Image (cartoon, rainbow, N blue to C red):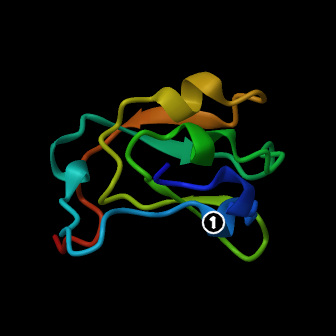
Amino acid sequence: MLLDEKKIKNKGKDGIPFGVAGKVEKDMGAWRMYKPVIDYSKCIKCLTCWFGCPDFAYEVNKQGQPVLREKNCKGCGICAEHCPVKCIEMVRDDHKKGKKK
């Protein structure tokens, strides 16, 4: 047996690994067409978006709110689709954040 299940302890979100050691994160957001925007006045902090995101594009801040990591998000919309209160809207991404005019 490779893993003794009796020795595994539930550490909540702190026990969920992020990424792979030694692997460089790619900028998935560079080619997306849409990005999720959260309406925090509607968010109930259920973290369904955080659990369901296939690209680990969400972090959880000290207030328990999900925060998008734009470089990891490919714009698939799974978070918006599964949000129970529909506080996530997929909006067209113009990729102008941080760029000077």
Please give the name of the residue rendered at 69% of the width and 36% of the height, measured from the top-left corner. Answer: 87
- Relative height, residue 32 to residue 101 (above, below): above
- Is 38 placed left or right of 75 in the picture? right
Quadrant in which residue 33 is drawn: top left
**Residue flagged by tag 1: what amino acid is it?**
Gly
Could you say where residue 36 lies in the image, as x and y percent from the top left?
48, 41
Could you say where residue 74 lies in the image, as x and y percent from the top left?
30, 41
Q: Residues within 10 Å of mark 1 (few under 14, many from 20)?
A: few
Could you say where residue 55 lies in the image, as x and y percent from the top left?
38, 46
Please give the name of the residue rendered at 30% of the width and 60% of the height, measured from the top-left corner. Answer: 71
- Is 7 placed left or right of 57 in the picture? right
In the image shown, does 54 or 88 lie closer to the viewer? 54
In the image shown, does 85 or 6 lie closer to the viewer? 6
How many labels were placed on the picture?
1
Residue found farthest to the front:
1
- Relative height, residue 87 to residue 66 (above, below): above
Quadrant in which residue 21 is drawn: bottom left
Q: Helix, strand or loop at disc 1?
A: helix
- Is 28 placed left or right of 65 in the picture? left
- Is 63 placed left or right of 28 in the picture? right
Quadrant in which residue 96 is drawn: bottom left
Could you say where residue 99 lies in the image, as x and y percent from the top left?
20, 70
Residue beneath label 1, please?
15
